[in-house]
């Protein structure tokens, strides 16, 4: 049988990976193949639409990559199982269907434009149009499909290391408009970018490691002075362990009432998640305060086993307190109960890590390390004197201040 017709029939019968036919490039390609028996105008229209699309996707010279990439980022029963390291538990017939789908995808991805044109039922009617049509190049397949040899072992390993669905394509996410949205340009900071605060980061690192290993671990509150690297530590953890299936989802404090919706979205997924709540603080009588308490411990919609909550705050007890609040408690019979209510939220974080402003020597060590990373050759005395002046102008020393100072030297 004509290989183009065979590829069309195989695409039509995709099963486990059928979802790729909803992706733009495979969908347009399949529509073009379906027009092989149609009128010349219909076929040429589908051909032109397909070529315009792959030009827009910048893959006119690497069609095979675009085609197989769609499969890599597909979410189905096999990719979910492989991401969780459990694909061997799938029935043999399902695994056979996966192998067949992979072969069909590769066959279609490697078709040349000349082959497709020659397979058109009314090719002779195209006349001089056919030679003038733009041609695509197949190029190389995406990473794991280049290694496909009939065995699913290497493909399964790719999903184990990278996750499935959009969690394979993207590494960081945010809860927005009632759904998990990818962060297209996430902060790529890693643990090697830090100087100082080794004790604090080691505690968070061990907790995260235990979480990934399925051992006992705790929700974590990173609190203390501003600009000391609390948020950066959390993001660095997600980057450090991303190849072990860890993803980070930021949840804005204002949307904590929607936490049960987020739980429903991730509870069935094979990856593990850090739910990140940045700059957490509450006023008295804040409704989301009670919601977070229930999430941390005691609520029906508690966090799933594949998620940890990491929160940052400038306050140890998270709730903002004013002198007027204390004055109002003079007439309150249950003053002790109110105090317990205030402390109960921070107490539900099993791990609390404090970040304080660095000493002068620690601050200057951070400046030196950052300057060295940036390749600055300024002599140490000049560098340190400038760093002190910069910190004085900004009201105090911090790692953030050190970073801003080093960046200012390039201006």
Image (tube, grey):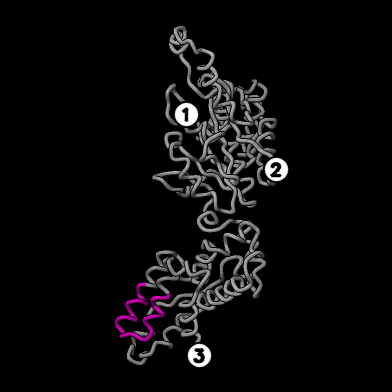
Label located before the other in sequence (1 or 3): 3
Residue in front for this viewpoint, 114 or 119:
119
The boundaries of the magenta stretch are 30-49
From the top left corner, tell me how far across and down residue 134 is, in percent. 40, 77
Q: Main secondary structure of the magenta part?
A: helix
From the top left corner, tell me how far across and down residue 79 is, in percent. 57, 62
Q: CA distance from mark 3 to mark 2?
A: 55 Å
Residue 289 lies, with reference to residue 375, above or below; the image says: above
From the top left corner, tell me how far across and down residue 73 is, in percent. 52, 61
Q: Is residue 278 left or right of residue 147?
A: left
The nearer-to-camera label among 3 and 2 is 2
User: Residue 127 lies in what quarter of the image?
Assistant: bottom left
Question: Could you say whether the residue bearing mark 2 is in a helix, strand or loop?
Answer: loop
- Number of marks: 3
Question: Could you say whether the residue bearing mark 3 is in a helix, strand or loop?
Answer: loop
The answer to whether residue 410 is visible is no
User: Which residue does the image show at 54% across and 72% down from the upper left?
Assistant: 139
The answer to whether residue 139 is visible is yes
Instruction: Name the residue that disc number 3 marks.
Output: 1
User: Residue 398 lies in what quarter of the image?
Assistant: top right
Q: CA distance from mark 1 to mark 3?
A: 66 Å
Instruction: Name the residue that disc number 1 marks.
Output: 289
Residue in front for this viewpoint, 163 or 266:
266
Instruction: Name the residue that disc number 2 marks.
Output: 215
């Amino acid at each position: 049988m004509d290989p183009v017709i065979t590829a069309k029939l195989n695409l039509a019968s995709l099963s486990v990976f059928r979802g790729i036919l909803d992706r733009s490039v495979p969908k347009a390609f399949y529509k073009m193949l379906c027009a092989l028996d149609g009128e010349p105008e219909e076929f040429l229209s589908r051909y032109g639409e397909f070529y315009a699309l792959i030009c827009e996707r910048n893959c006119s010279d690497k069609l095979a990559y675009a085609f197989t990439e769609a499969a890599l980022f597909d979410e189905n029963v096999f990719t979910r199982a492989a991401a969780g390291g459990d694909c061997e538990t799938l029935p043999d017939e399902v695994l056979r269907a996966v192998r067949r789908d992979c072969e069909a995808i590769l066959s279609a991805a490697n078709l040349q434009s000349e082959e497709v044109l020659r397979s058109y039922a009314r090719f002779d009617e195209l006349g001089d149009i056919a030679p003038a049509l733009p041609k695509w190049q197949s190029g190389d397949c995406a990473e794991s499909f280049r290694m496909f040899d009939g065995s699913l072992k290497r493909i399964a390993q790719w999903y184990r290391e990278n996750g499935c669905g959009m969690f394979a394509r993207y590494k960081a996410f945010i809860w927005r408009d009632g759904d998990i949205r990818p962060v297209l340009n996430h902060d790529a900071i890693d643990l090697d970018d830090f100087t100082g605060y080794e004790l604090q980061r080691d505690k968070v690192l061990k907790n995260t490691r235990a979480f990934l290993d399925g051992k006992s671990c705790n929700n974590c509150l990173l609190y203390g002075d501003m600009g000391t690297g609390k948020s950066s530590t959390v993001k660095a953890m997600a980057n450090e362990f991303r190849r072990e299936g860890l993803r980070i989802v930021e949840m804005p404090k204002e949307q904590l009432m929607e936490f049960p919706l987020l739980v429903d979205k991730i509870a069935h997924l094979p990856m593990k998640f850090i739910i990140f709540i940045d700059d957490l603080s509450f006023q008295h009588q804040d409704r989301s305060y009670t919601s977070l308490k229930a999430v941390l411990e005691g609520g029906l919609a508690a966090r799933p086993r594949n998620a940890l909550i990491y929160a940052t705050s400038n306050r140890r007890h998270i709730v903002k307190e004013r002198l007027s609040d204390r004055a109002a408690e003079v007439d309150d019979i249950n003053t002790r109960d109110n105090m317990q209510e205030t402390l109960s939220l921070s107490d539900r974080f099993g791990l609390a890590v404090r970040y304080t402003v660095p000493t002068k020597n620690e601050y200057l060590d951070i400046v030196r390390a950052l300057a060295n990373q940036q390749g600055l050759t300024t002599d140490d005395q000049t560098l340190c004197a400038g760093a002190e002046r910069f910190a004085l102008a900004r009201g105090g020393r911090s790692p953030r201040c050190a970073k801003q100072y080093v960046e200012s030297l390039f201006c």
